[in-house]
Image (cartoon, rainbow, N blue to C red):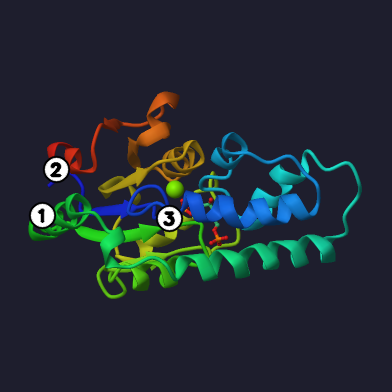
Amino acid sequence: MKYRAIIFDLDGVICHTDKYHYMAWKQVADELNIYFDETINNRLRGVSRMESFEIILERYEGAMSEEEKIKYATQKNDVYKELLKNMSPADLSDEVKETLDALRSQGHKLAIGSSSKNAGFILNQLGLGDYFDAVSDGNNITNSKPDPEVFVKAAQFVGEQPADCLVVEDAKAGLEAAIAGGMECAAIGDAKSCGLATWNLDTFSDLLKVTG
Ligand code: B16
Ligand code: MG
């Protein structure tokens, strides 16, 4: 078995929360009169909450104190968490669930490596609260992607060496994090175009062709 553990990014790989992030940040941007669209929203993938707000603030004319930044980021998160309540096990595609089950029955350990502080809540909404062997997320890291910390911790949590892990990512920052952590990586979605991944996947189930 080439990879003893597979570490999955959450948003954009296991599920799709971009629209909720967008709706919640859009409310903050509108309140502050900042231009914000879905192209800018794409730059927030895999990036932490506060770093996401800094990207949005690139188009803000005035100055903002750290306290105000935290206030607006908290406001965004409150709206986002309300929207996440709309998620249910129906948001987990059959393809993703069947592929995860197949990987598990092949003997791979399965872990989450997500920048999100809401990862546990999202996994519960999807009915995957107890599914993974380990969850490394925004609550157990100091530095977010492209720093490798979240994936290095995930490997530690499942007791495997980085060289024995495969990371699955939808964001360039996530692929950079995997590589910096000494792990091979598979890209899905937009991340394929940056050419950094060991494998480019057309569909989630293509993982079964590369995991060996
Ligand atoms: P939160 P991932 C990331 O999750 C999202 O892609 C990114 O857009 C978000 O800003 C980040 O989580 C932090 O999320 O505000 O919920 O802590 O792709 O690393 O699973
Ligand atoms: Mg992602």
Comparing labels 3 and 1, the label whose residue is closer to the camera: 1
Mark 1: few, some, or many residues within 10 Å (few <14, many ≥20)? some
Who is closer to the viewer here, 171 or 93? Answer: 93
Residue 60, image x and y in percent? 83, 43
**Residue 139 visible somewhere in the drawing:** no
Residue type at tag 1: Ala
State the image coordinates of residue 20 (x, y, percent, origin top left): 51, 56
Tell me the distance, in whole angstroms, between the alpha carbons under discs 3 and 2: 23 Å
Where residue 79 sits, quadrant-wise, is bottom right
Q: Position of residue 121 (x, y in %)?
A: 43, 72
**In the picture, residue 188 is in which quadrant?**
top left
Mark 1, residue position: 102
Q: Residue at x 32, y 67 (%)?
A: 126
Q: Amino acid at mark 3?
A: Val
Is the residue at mark 3 in contact range of ligand 1, meaning its CB lies under 8 Å from it?
no
In space, the residues marked 3 and 1 are separated at their CA atoms by: 24 Å
Mark 3 and mark 2 lie on one chain; the one further toward the N terminus is 3
**Residue type highlighted by circle 2:** Leu
Residue at image location 83% in from the left, 63% down from the top: 68
Label 3 belongs to which residue?
Answer: 152
